[in-house]
Amino acid sequence: GCVSKVEAAILKVAEIDEVTVSLADHTAWINFSGEPTHIAKAAIAAVQSTGREAHEIHGDEALEEAAQQQSEDEELAFRQHLMFAAMGAGSGLCLMFSGMMGLLPSVEHHIDFWRITGVLTLLLMLWIGRDFYRGMLKSIQHLEGSMDTLVGLGTLSAWVYSMALVLKPEMIAVNAQHLYFEAALIILGLIHLGQGLEARAKGKTGEAIRLLMGLQPKTARLVLGDKEVDLPIAQIQHDDLLRVRPGEHIPVDGCIASGSSLVDESMMTGEPFPIEKKVDDRVVAGSINGNGSFLLRAQQVGKETVLAQMVDSVRQAQASQPPIA
C-alpha cells in the first residue's frame, strides 16, 4: 500500500515517465525527461506530500551506506522495542493467567492498582509504538489509511476501553467488563517481531549487491609517463593506462596493453581456473589478477563496466514487480 501511494505521487510530477519503488531497500528508481536537479527536487516534494521523507542519493557507495545504516537502525530498534513489549506483555499475561485480569467487579478493591497499570501501559505503548502512532497521525492528515492506522487505532482502542472500564465501570455492562491492557502490548510486540523478521529478510536481499560491490576496488594506479599515482576509481577516464599488480582486483573493463598474467574470472564466468591473459586480451572489473603484472588500457569505466551493470540488474530485479502484483 505504501509503495503504490508513493509511486502514484511521483508519477504526478511532469516529465517523469516511469517510477519503481523498492520496498526491500526503500528506494525509488525514476525514468524521466528533463533537467535532473529539477526532477529530483520535484520527486522529493511529491514523496513528502504523502507524509514520508526522501532524499537524493549520489552513487552506488552512498546508496549502500544508506541501506546498511537503515538496516542497522531497524535491527537496533527491533531489539529494543521487542524487549520492552515482551516485558510489558509478559507482565500482563501473568496477571491474566493469575485470574486478576478478568471481570472488573472481581478486582474493584484493586482500583488504584489498575489505574497505575493503565498509566504504565500507556507510557509503554507510546514508547514502543511511537513510530506507529506518528504514522497514524500522518495518515489521518493526508486522509489515507495504512498499517500504522490499523495498529494505532487497534491498540489505542483497547487501552481507552480498558481505562474507561477502570474509571467508570458502571458505564459498561457487566458481561463486557474485561480489561485489555496486555492485549495492546502483545499486539505491538507481535508487530515488532514481524518487522524484525522482515528487516532481516531485506538485509539478506541486499547481501548479493554488497558482495558484488566489494569486488570493485576503491582506487586504481594511473600510469603517467615515468610516474604512477593512485587515484579514486571515479576519476579514471577512457583510454587511461593503469597498472594492475599481482593479487589486485582489476579496477575497470579494458584490454591489456603490456604484460601478461593469469586472471581469475570466476565472479563472471564461474570458471574455477584462472585464464591466461596477454596483450590485446579483454579483462573485466572485479576479476582478480594472478602473479603477473600488466598495463591495462581503460575502455569502460564507472557505470559502463560489466560489474556495475550486474549491480544495477540485481537492484532492478529486486525493485521490479510481476504484473500480477
Image: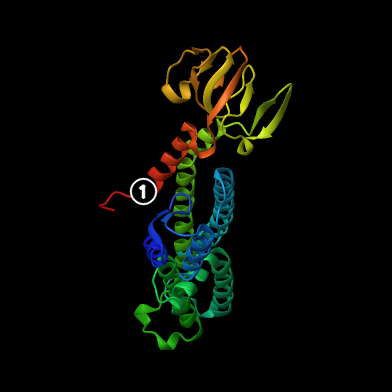
Give left or right: position of 297 versus 265: right
Q: Quadrant of residue 6?
A: bottom left
Q: Disc 1 residue type? A: Ser
Decide: is 249 above or below 193: above
The residue identified by callout 1 is: 320
**Rendered residue at 41%/62% (across/down):** 15
Few, some or many C-alpha atoms within 10 Å of disc 1 (few <14, some 14-19, many ≥20)? some
Residue 202 or 210: which is nearer the viewer?
210
Question: Which secondary structure lies at badge 1?
Answer: loop
- Towards the viewer: 33 or 85: 33
Instruction: Return the residue found at the far right.
Output: 227
Residue for point 53% across, 37% down: 210
Task: List x then y, in percent, for residue 116.
Answer: 59, 75
Q: Is residue 286 visible?
A: no
Residue 282 seen in the current view:
yes
Residue at the far left in the pictured view: 324
Q: Nearer the viewer, residue 154 or 40?
A: 40
State which quadrant residue 12 falls in: bottom left
